[in-house]
Image (cartoon, helix red, strand yellow):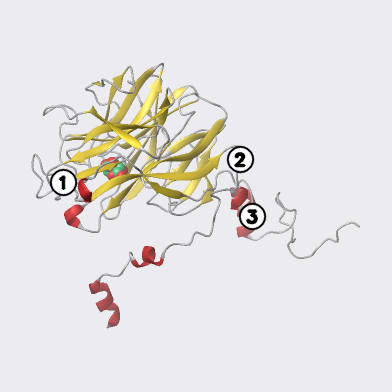
Amino acid sequence: MPKQKTVGFPWDIPQAKPDRPLSLAMERLYDNYLTPRPEDNPLFTSFRYTKLAGFDYSNHDGTVSRRDPSKIVKVNDVYYVWYTKRATPTPPNGAELCTDVIPSTDWDLAEIWYATSQDGFTWQEQGVAVTRPNKPGLGWRSVSTPDILVWQDKYYLYYQAFMEASGLKGDHCPVTLSSADSPDGPWTPCNEIVVANGAKDEWDQFSIHDPYLLVFAGKIHLYYKAAYGDRPDYLVGNGLAIAESPMGPFVKHPLNPIMNSGHETCYFPFRQGIANLAIRNGNENNTIQYSPDGVNFSLASVTSLMPTAAGPYIPDAFSDTNDGAGISWGLSHFSDKQDPTSKHSFLGRFDCNLLANKQSNELKETDIVHNPEVYFAQSLSPEQIQARQK
Ligand code: AAL
């Protein structure tokens, strides 16, 4: 029997946009998202987190911090990750009280270390990759927030090079690189700024943060983050600089900023284009976005509890693929800021389901139930309670 045409919106969810007047929200459902149900959307995921084995944090007393992991690469069946490591006599003490050995922020007086793993859960710290040069060398105060590029069989670590304690004037730094023939080093610093801060009064005049490397459309794409405007009224955005070889020149895209939201950068090849996790900060915080050209991004899904400073395992980050496979796990950091006497960060693993050829329905949950303590951790201060009781 032919189905009777309903007057109201149909019960069987139409997979394609139905030919009928639609509310703005329903127009958007079909225009903005790959599928009407997030559960069916390859660019929607929920996240799961697992603690890592193998790292020592000095009883989490704040003197040891590991944060801002790079993307993960696999070489000869071994996973590699690079990250900011701080090992200082005290936790960060703020810009006013910092000295040559006491850090201002969690990423001050840091070095770049690396670790390897066979399974992504248990890691072995292998040692330092990039140390701080003597003053006034680039990054003498701190080297942090690395990412890796593999290009023509050579390895390149890009990272933030601080020439003053972070927090003195802001979080100001440019980006430099070190290169090596093997992921185990030794790393040779290029001793040059490879992505310079913007000109005076431009949005990225003070900081080029979170360099993040992919090879796309035959060229090296370096995504980065900068915050513009005076704190606390600042806006965080991402920029793109493109080069034909690792030392540059990196040409900033004329449309920068290319993302209006998102703190630490996280991009990966997806099908013909590039996908992005917009994490922390901005109107489009907690979204996953997609761009066919690596420049112009649109919303692909909205999610929650995203990994901070995500560094995913990306098998095809540098293969200039036209058929990006997506991601299913990586490392992120967790910052313990509650107690100022033990402030530090530690690495953990996230799992997700952002595979282009979705093989399972796992990790496609929209209704994430949190432990009540997660809510009460966001408590009002005693002063705020008092003000509301008046
Ligand atoms: C991070 C990153 C950059 C900033 C600081 C350390 O989350 O955005 O690396 O400079 O915070």
Mark 3 packing: few (<14 Cα in 10 Å), some, or many (20+)? Answer: few
CB-based contact (under 8 Å), mark 3 and mark 1 = no
Q: Which of marks 3 and 2 is nearer the N terminus?
A: 3
Mark 3 residue type: Glu
Identify residue for label 1.
104
Of the two numbered discs 2 and 1 in the rendering, the one whose residue sits closer to the viewer: 2
Disc 2, SS: loop
Q: In which quarter of the image is residue 83?
A: top left
Mark 2 residue type: Gln
Of the two numbered discs 3 and 2 in the rendering, the one whose residue sits closer to the viewer: 2
Side of 188 relative to 151 (left or right):
left
Disc 3, SS: helix
Mark 1 packing: few (<14 Cα in 10 Å), some, or many (20+)? Answer: many
Identify residue for label 3.
27
Mark 1 residue type: Ser
Compare residues 273 and 328 and report the one nearer the observer. Answer: 328
Tell me the distance, in whole angstroms, between the alpha carbons under discs 2 and 1.
46 Å
Asked if disc 2 is less than 8 Å from ligand 1, the answer is: no
Q: Earlier in the sequence, mark 3 or mark 1?
A: 3
Q: Quadrant of residue 373?
A: bottom left
Q: Is residue 113 visible?
A: yes
Identify residue for label 2.
359
Of the two numbered discs 3 and 1 in the rendering, the one whose residue sits closer to the viewer: 1
